[in-house]
């Protein structure tokens, strides 16, 4: 398939100022020649154009002008895919982009599969596998923090760490294999200790990377937070405050919210899906009762809860009941209506963070965001801006590498068998190689790149 010339629309479908159709492959320039007519003395056909030049002209399909376009030429290997590449910028809108793509396909290209451009960049050595995955992370980033970390991975920060680890283990294995080749020479005690220290450092470094898995999951997929409490404590008002706009209807009438409302907010750089729920209470209303059941289901499935109390009223028996019911959950207690005279004289006994806010004035909302961030990062590697975030595939490979390297250290320490030590080190090295694509299968590549959009 690498011998094919592929094409796809690389911009989102819909109305817009511009759309881009990308062509890549050995016949990219010839395909573009067949459907592009240059306009003006400064423009030329793609096959005669210098690399990294832009040309004005029109795209033609069946002797009919489709659109006036700008055509950019990127000759191999100075392109994203390391192949001859042409990018045609046409007017935005589903129809112009589709017709330009139709013209390109009629000229000899085939439609690209999801992620095929990035896959070719990997196969042709432009990116390693971790960097290729970072391209998808950039596209799907929901916050600036997630985008910054994805850009670090695209720049090779994770790849450099993995390469250094592999080199350390390869050097250790080369010493081991040298003694296998010369069995009459025992490993000196100081050499054995030096090898154990080197392997131990590699294991600890891998464990450091493994600890970033939680941060990676949060930044890629976000977390879910259910806003719960009895009616009229200000749950919907809190949702609106955290979102920065009015999403939920607010009313002094208890039971206004009958169903869950879900929206994603950017809280301190973290994508947090907030779930506004119906007020918890006993009710004979069948519709409201269904809403209460959904509230409990949302609270059960959420990563943590924001439990809202009305600080302008004394603690009610219902409040005490619900505080006890969710005592074992990760949560933040939110004392709302701090703009009114305080009637909640004593805070409930809990180790959960407590924040006083006024959803009316906005007082305390920034402190609440800090508390939410701390709860999300609790137990993770660091609450600071993370620089590396491994994904589930990296996590699996690192766990196998740690297990194999630990087995190698154990057999070396107890002189169980130097051949076993070398074999376990090879397993660890191969597992690390999977992270950056030193070892891969077509099935693995299919699984990774099928998650990309067509045109990327």
Image (cartoon, helix red, strand yellow):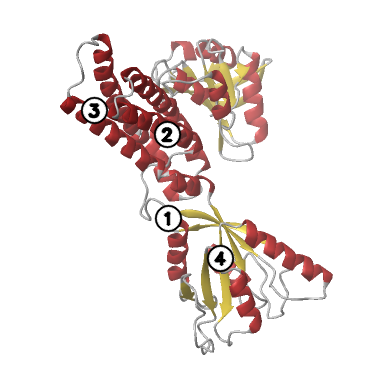
For the residue carrying disc 1, how many other residues have a C-alpha within 10 Å: few (<14), some (14-19), or many (20+)?
A: few
Query: If you read the primary sequence from the N terminus, does the residue marked by circle 1 or circle 4 appear first?
Result: 4
Residue position marked by numbered label 3 in the rendering: 195
Query: If you read the primary sequence from the N terminus, does the residue marked by circle 3 or circle 1 appear first?
Result: 3
Residue position marked by numbered label 2 in the rendering: 398
Camera-nearest label, 2 or 3: 3
Q: Is residue 441 visible?
A: yes
Q: Quadrant of residue 96?
A: top right
Q: Pointers 2 and 3 in contact (CB under 8 A)?
A: no
Q: Is residue 238 above or below residue 265?
A: below
Horizontal side of residue 265 vs 421, given as left or right: right
Q: Secondary structure at mark 4?
A: loop
Quarter that holds the N terminus: top right
Q: Is residue 46 above or below residue 206?
A: above
For the residue carrying disc 3, how many other residues have a C-alpha within 10 Å: few (<14), some (14-19), or many (20+)?
A: many
Label 4 and label 2: CA atoms lie apart by 32 Å
For the residue carrying disc 2, how many other residues have a C-alpha within 10 Å: few (<14), some (14-19), or many (20+)?
A: many
Label 2 and label 3: CA atoms lie apart by 20 Å
For the residue carrying disc 4, how many other residues have a C-alpha within 10 Å: few (<14), some (14-19), or many (20+)?
A: few
Residue position marked by numbered label 4 in the rendering: 328
Residue position marked by numbered label 1 in the rendering: 379
* Residue at the image point whose x is 68% and y is 81% from the top: 252
Q: Secondary structure at mark 3?
A: helix
Label 4 and label 3: CA atoms lie apart by 46 Å
Q: Secondary structure at mark 1?
A: loop
Label 1 and label 4: CA atoms lie apart by 16 Å
Q: Secondary structure at mark 2?
A: helix
């Amino acid at each position: 398939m690498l011998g094919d010339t592929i094409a796809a629309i690389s911009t989102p479908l819909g109305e817009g100022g511009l759309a881009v159709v990308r062509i890549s492959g050995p016949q990219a320039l010839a395909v573009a020649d067949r459907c592009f007519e240059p306009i003006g003395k400064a423009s030329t056909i793609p096959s005669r154009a210098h690399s990294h030049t832009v040309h004005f002209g029109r795209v033609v399909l069946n002797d009919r002008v489709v659109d006036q376009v700008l055509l950019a030429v990127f000759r191999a290997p100075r392109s994203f895919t390391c192949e001859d590449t042409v990018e045609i910028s046409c007017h935005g809108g589903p129809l112009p982009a589709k017709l330009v793509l139709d013209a390109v396909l009629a000229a000899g290209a085939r439609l690209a599969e999801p992620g095929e451009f990035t896959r070719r960049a990997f196969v042709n050595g432009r990116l390693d596998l971790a960097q290729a995955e970072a391209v998808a992370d950039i596209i799907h980033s929901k916050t600036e923090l997630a985008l910054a970390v994805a850009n670090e991975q695209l720049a090779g920060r994770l790849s450099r760490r993995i390469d250094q680890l592999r080199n350390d283990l390869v050097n250790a294995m080369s010493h081991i294999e040298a003694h296998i080749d010369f069995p009459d020479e025992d490993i000196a005690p100081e050499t054995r200790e030096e090898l154990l220290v080197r392997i131990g450092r590699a294991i600890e470094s891998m464990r450091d990377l493994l600890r970033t898995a939680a941060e990676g999951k949060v930044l890629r997929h976000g977390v879910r937070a259910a806003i719960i409490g009895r009616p009229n404590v200000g749950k919907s008002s809190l949702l609106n405050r955290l979102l920065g706009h009015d999403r939920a209807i607010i009313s002094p009438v208890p039971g206004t919210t009958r169903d869950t409302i879900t929206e994603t907010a950017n809280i301190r750089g973290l994508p947090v899906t907030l779930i506004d729920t119906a007020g918890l209470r006993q009710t004979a209303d069948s519709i409201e009762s269904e809403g209460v059941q959904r509230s409990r289901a949302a609270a059960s499935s959420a990563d943590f809860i924001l439990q809202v109390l009305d600080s302008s009223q004394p603690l009610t028996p219902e409040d005490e009941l619900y505080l006890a019911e969710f005592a074992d959950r990760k949560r933040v207690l939110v004392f709302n209506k701090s703009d009114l005279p305080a009637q909640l004289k004593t805070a409930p006994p809990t180790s959960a963070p407590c924040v006083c806010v006024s959803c009316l004035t906005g007082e305390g909302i920034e402190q609440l965001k800090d508390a939410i961030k701390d709860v999300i990062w609790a137990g993770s590697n660091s609450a600071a801006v993370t620089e590396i975030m491994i994904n589930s595939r990296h996590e699996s490979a690192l766990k196998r590498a740690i297990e194999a390297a630990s087995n190698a250290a154990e057999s070396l320490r107890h002189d169980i068998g130097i051949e076993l030590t070398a074999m376990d080190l090879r397993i660890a090295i191969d597992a690390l190689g999977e992270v950056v694509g030193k070892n891969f299968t077509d099935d693995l590549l299919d699984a990774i790149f099928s998650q990309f959009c067509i045109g990327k």
